[in-house]
Image (tube, grey):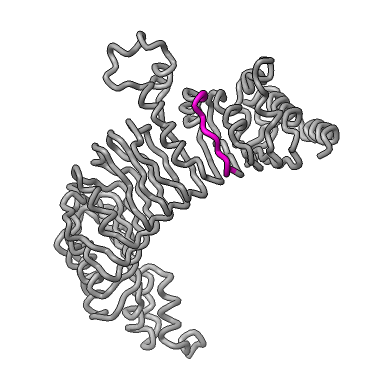
C-alpha cells in the first residue's frame, strides 16, 4: 500500500475537497481503499459543461444530459444524510429544473454553509424559496440566469454573512425584502442586477463590505450602512442619493459611469437642452455631491476618470475630506478641473497615486492646475501635504516628465516618488516624444536632487 493511501479518511477527504466532483469520482478506480472514499468528501463541485463538453455537441443529446443527471443523483444517494460544507452547482439549458430543485433542497437539508449557484436556462430559472430559509448558510452566491422575482417576507437567513448576486433579476419592490432577511450580513456583492427601477435603499446595520456594479435600471439610490468599511460603487449616476449614512467608511472606490453626451449637455447653457430633455442632466449629476458628502470620512479613495468628469461639474461645492490619507486616480482620459480642488480639500493627504499619467492630464500644466496663473487664487498644489507620489503605467513621454516636474515644483512636502511602467515599457512606437531610459533617469535624478529627494 502506498503512503498516501495509509492516511486517515479525514485527511484524504480534505485533499480530495480541492478537486472537482468529477475528478474525485475518478479516484475510485485506484484501489479498493479509494472505491467509495470520494463519496465522503464534504464538498460538491458540479459543472455540467465538464461532463457534457458542449464544444463536442453533447449538450444536444438527451441521453448524455440524462446520464449527467443520473450521475449527480447517484452522488447524492451515496452520500445519504452526511453533513456537507461547500457546494458549487453550475448548469445550463437541458438539465431538468425539478432535478435542480431536488439537489439544492438536499444539500440545504444537510446544512451546507457555502452555496454557489449559476443556472443558465433558455427561460430564467426560478430558485425554490426553500433556498432562503436556511439556518446554516453562511455564504451564498447566485449567478446568472436565476429569477428572484418570487421573494416573499418568509425568507430568512440568520447566519448568512456573504451574499453575491451576479446577473439576477428582481421584481419591483422585492429588493427591499433582501437585507432584513439577513440580519448578520457583512458582505454584499451585486453585479449586473436587473429590476432596480424605483427608489432603492441598501440598509443594514451589520454590513461592512458593499460592492455594486452596473445595476440595470433607473431611479434613486440610498445607503443606510453605518458599519460599512469598504464601498465599491460602479454604476450609472443615480437620479438622486437621498441618504448616504457611511460615517465609518474606511475605503471607497467610485466609478460613476456617464456618457460624453451627458457631460456635454450638463456643461451647456440651460436653453440648449432643457426644453427637450425630460431628465435634468445637470441636476442628476449635481446630486453626486450628496454621495460624496456621505463618504467624507473615508481614508482611502479611488476615483475613475469618468468620476472626475462628474466632480468637475461641482468643484465649487467640493467638501473637505479631513481624514483622507490616500487618493488614487484610475487611468482614462478626463478633464482635471476637479483635481486641484480635491487636493486643496484634503488637508491630511499623504499619498497621491495616478494610473497612466499620459491620459490623465491635458497638454499644458496651466490646464491641470489653473490656479497657478491666476494671482487671485491660492495654488492648491503649493499647499498640498502629499509626501508620496505613485505613478503607474509610465510611458516616458516628455509630457509626463513635464508633469512630474510640475509636481516636484508645487508639492513642498514630497519625500518619495515611485514610478512603474506596469508593462507599458518606454519605447512604444505609437507613443510620441518617448525618451530613453538613461535620459529619463537623468531627468528624474536631477529633479530629485534639486528638491532634496
Q: Residue at x 36, y 23 (%)?
A: 283
Question: Eyeballing the image, is 318 above or below 66?
Answer: above
Residue 142 seen: yes
**Lateral position of residue 169 relative to residue 435, left or right:** left
Residue 364 seen: no
Image coords of residue 422 (percent x, y):
63, 41
Residue 261 in the magenta stretch? The answer is: no
Q: Residue at x 34, y 62 (%)?
A: 184
Which quarter of the figure has residue 134?
Answer: bottom left
**Lateral position of residue 289 relative to residue 174, left or right:** right
Image coords of residue 191 (percent x, y):
35, 46
Image coords of residue 140 (percent x, y):
32, 60
Magenta segment main secondary structure: loop
Closer to the camera, 434 or 240?
A: 240
Residue 323 in the magenta stretch? The answer is: yes
Q: Which residues are magenta?
A: 315-324
Question: Eyeballing the image, is 315 above or below 275?
Answer: below
Amino acid at each position: 500500500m502506498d503512503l498516501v493511501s495509509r492516511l486517515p479518511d479525514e485527511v484524504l477527504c480534505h485533499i480530495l475537497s480541492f478537486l472537482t466532483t468529477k475528478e474525485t469520482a475518478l479516484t475510485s478506480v485506484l484501489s479498493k481503499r479509494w472505491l467509495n472514499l470520494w463519496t465522503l468528501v464534504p464538498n460538491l463541485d458540479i459543472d455540467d459543461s465538464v461532463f457534457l463538453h458542449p464544444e463536442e455537441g453533447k449538450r444536444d443529446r438527451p441521453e448524455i444530459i440524462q446520464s449527467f443527471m443520473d450521475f449527480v443523483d447517484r452522488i447524492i444517494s451515496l452520500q445519504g444524510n452526511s453533513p456537507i460544507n461547500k457546494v458549487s452547482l453550475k448548469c445550463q439549458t437541458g438539465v431538468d429544473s425539478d432535478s435542480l430543485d431536488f439537489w439544492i433542497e438536499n444539500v440545504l437539508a444537510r446544512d451546507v454553509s457555502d452555496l454557489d449557484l449559476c443556472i443558465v436556462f433558455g427561460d430564467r430559472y426560478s430558485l425554490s424559496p426553500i433556498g432562503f430559509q436556511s439556518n446554516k448558510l453562511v455564504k451564498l452566491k447566485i449567478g446568472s440566469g436565476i429569477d428572484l422575482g418570487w421573494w416573499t417576507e418568509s425568507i430568512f437567513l440568520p447566519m448568512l454573512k456573504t451574499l453575491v448576486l451576479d446577473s439576477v433579476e428582481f421584481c419591483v419592490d422585492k429588493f427591499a425584502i433582501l437585507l432584513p432577511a439577513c440580519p448578520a450580513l457583512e458582505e454584499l456583492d451585486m453585479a449586473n442586477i436587473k429590476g432596480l427601477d424605483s427608489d432603492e435603499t441598501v440598509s443594514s446595520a451589520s454590513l461592512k463590505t458593499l460592492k455594486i456594479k452596473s445595476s440595470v435600471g433607473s431611479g434613486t439610490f440610498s445607503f443606510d450602512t453605518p458599519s460599512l468599511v469598504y464601498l465599491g460603487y460602479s454604476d450609472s449616476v443615480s437620479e438622486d442619493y437621498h441618504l448616504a449614512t457611511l460615517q465609518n467608511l474606511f475605503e471607497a472606490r467610485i466609478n460613476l459611469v456617464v456618457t460624453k453626451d451627458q457631460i456635454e449637455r450638463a456643461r451647456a447653457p440651460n436653453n440648449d437642452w432643457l426644453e427637450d430633455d425630460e431628465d435634468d442632466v445637470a441636476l442628476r449629476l449635481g446630486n453626486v455631491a450628496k454621495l460624496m458628502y456621505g463618504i467624507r470620512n473615508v481614508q482611502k479613495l479611488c476615483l475613475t476618470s469618468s468620476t472626475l468628469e462628474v466632480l468637475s461639474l461641482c468643484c465649487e461645492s467640493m467638501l473637505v475630506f479631513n481624514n483622507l490619507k490616500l487618493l488614487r486616480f484610475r487611468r482614462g482620459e478626463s478633464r482635471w478641473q476637479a483635481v486641484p480642488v480635491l487636493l486643496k480639500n484634503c488637508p491630511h493627504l499623504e499619498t497621491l497615486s495616478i494610473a497612466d499619467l499620459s491620459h490623465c492630464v491635458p497638454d499644458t500644466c496651466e490646464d491641470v492646475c489653473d490656479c497657478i496663473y491666476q494671482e487671485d487664487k491660492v495654488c492648491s498644489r503649493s499647499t498640498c501635504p502629499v509626501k508620496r507620489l505613485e505613478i503607474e503605467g509610465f510611458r516616458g513621454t516628455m509630457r509626463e516628465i513635464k508633469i512630474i516636474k510640475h509636481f516636484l515644483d508645487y508639492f513642498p512636502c514630497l519625500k518619495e516618488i515611485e514610478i512603474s511602467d506596469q508593462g507599458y515599457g518606454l519605447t512604444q512606437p505609437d507613443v510620441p516624444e518617448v525618451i530613453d531610459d538613461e535620459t529619463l533617469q537623468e531627468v528624474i535624478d536631477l529633479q530629485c536632487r534639486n528638491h532634496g529627494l
